[in-house]
Amino acid sequence: MTTPQGIPRRFGRLTAVGAALTAFMVAVTGTAIQAAASPRTTEKPPVPSLTWTDCQGGFECANADVPLDYRKPQGKTITLAVVRKKAADQTKRKGTLFMQPGGPGNSGVDFVRNNHATLPAALRDSFDVFGYDVRGVGRSSALTCFDDARYTRAVTEAKGVPGPDAFEPALREAAAFDQACVDNAGELLPHVGTEYVARDIDLLREALGEQQLTYYGRSFGSYIGTVYAAMFPKRVRALTLDGAYDPVHYANRPYAYDRPQYLALDGAMSRFLDWCAADRSTCGFGDGNPRAAFEKLKADLDANPVPTANGGQANGYTLVYRLMFNINEGKVIWPTLGAQLRKAQLRDNTSFLLRPPSPASFDFLGPNVAVECVDRDYPRDLRGLERNVAANAKAAPLLGPAMAYGPPTYDHQHATACVQWPGERVSRYDGSYRAKGSAPILVLGTTGDPDTPYRDAVALSRQLDNASLLTFRAEGHTAFGRSACATDAVVAYLVDLDVPASGTTCADETQPPSSTPKAAPPGTTLGELRNGVDERVERMGAVS
């Protein structure tokens, strides 16, 4: 495969925590933060010229140069890696389908390459399927904050059951992370927000010769699509937003966004443990009291970590971190989770729940934090931060404390870093999100989604000027590829612009197998095969 250029070298230098805290104090006075500003220029940026080369498997790859800063559209550029696979019969194609994975931090290039073969034939026949790595991610000038050694130290020292004095250490760790971002990605950092990502998409649309955008975005990809529609409503042909965000809360009221996410994650874990109690033989964990067993397991692993095969160690935080991602698979994964928790009880380091975050994870996690800190407007108030972190940990006792007081990694652990964020945020988008005048937009929400709460999909469908909500009654994250009903609706919408009636409900969730499956059932991808975060390449599965 031809590898697009633009991957920066890793950096090893870290600034001392004391200097990071000093930088925070400067930022909190208001001297280091700029409010979001749309580019104040009428000068049009040049449309990228795409030179396609074969990159194996029938895919074509190219590089696209776009402005680093849209306030200076003719100035310095950043190179985006793009990929496509053309429809087999070009005489029947309807256009290009943009596909955007979750994150922030997942590779859109890999998303297309890994999922194209399992897409419904109607999509592969109707569209050239297109993806790209957004600015600051993957092959598109990936940003680095903590280096691998420093990130490894952070996640190794974190706890599954943080003590009563956990807030100040969490604050210092987050300040050190922020300073590392400034040191290692300073020039890029202000420009990775979603407004600029949406502007990139519009240039790529034009470069591909498309008059309007046809788009599928899942999880964070739904927020990118929402911002695009808000900025360019007349350029929307069809937009599918799966596992949707409440954009107003996400960008402008972040604590109101965080709390439901904590509750959704803990709710999913709670329902799994209830199933373990009800089906003891299939689950195999907890001896009839899985909640108590889980709490004891976290504390035992903190007190006596399990050595891993590569010389590291797994503790209670490791367990929580892995569950946070693997619970996304829904009920089909439940027997596997029960078996893996039992292995963890036995201190068997082959349990995938005892695999600490790795360098592949860190490549995802650094951009995940940085992009959201640019996108989101947290109040600059440490006492308010402390109150909200404590409240979230209390409201979500199963997984919440480890997330609330852990180092900056995934969504739940961003507040400590984002409140102290010392950089400019010129590329954030702050609304409105109505997308007035757009074509109909399809929003999908899953009722038991642990990652993007169902209430967010409801909120987005109401905020958009012209949207239809499809509900998937199920556990797990997102709907397309996990529900034949939802997948068929998405295909009909993207191909033929057949919009399902708002209020349409799908209820075809795969139920838990009677034992731990050896391979992924049709339409699913087991968390054991994904292993969490960027080691888990974003896959959608093929619905039979």
Image (spheres, grey):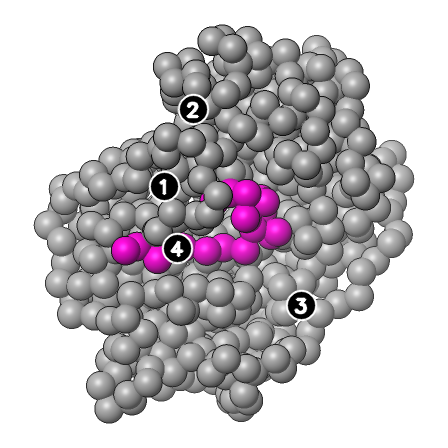
The residues colored magenta run 526-544
Give the residue type at disc 4: Gly
Where is residue 183 shown, x and y percent of the image? Answer: 80, 54
Q: Secondary structure at mark 1?
A: loop
Which of the two marks, 4 or 3, is nearer to us in this view? 4
Task: Determine crowd level at label 1: few under 14, some 14-19, many 20+ residues with C-alpha closer than 10 A.
Answer: many
Instruction: For marks 2 and 4, give the CA distance.
Output: 24 Å
Give the mark, 1 or 3, whose residue is nearer the N terminus. 3
Give the mark, 2 or 3, whose residue is nearer the N terminus. 3
Q: Which residue is mark 3?
A: 141
Query: As rendered, which of 258 and 343 lies closer to the eye?
Result: 343
Report if residue 528 lies within the magenta region: yes
User: Considering the image in quadrants, where does the C terminus appear?
Assistant: bottom left
Give the mark, 2 or 4, whose residue is nearer the N terminus. 2
Task: Say which mark, if any, is on residue 541.
Answer: 4
Instruction: For marks 1 and 3, give the CA distance.
Output: 28 Å
Residue 361, placed above or below residue 288: below
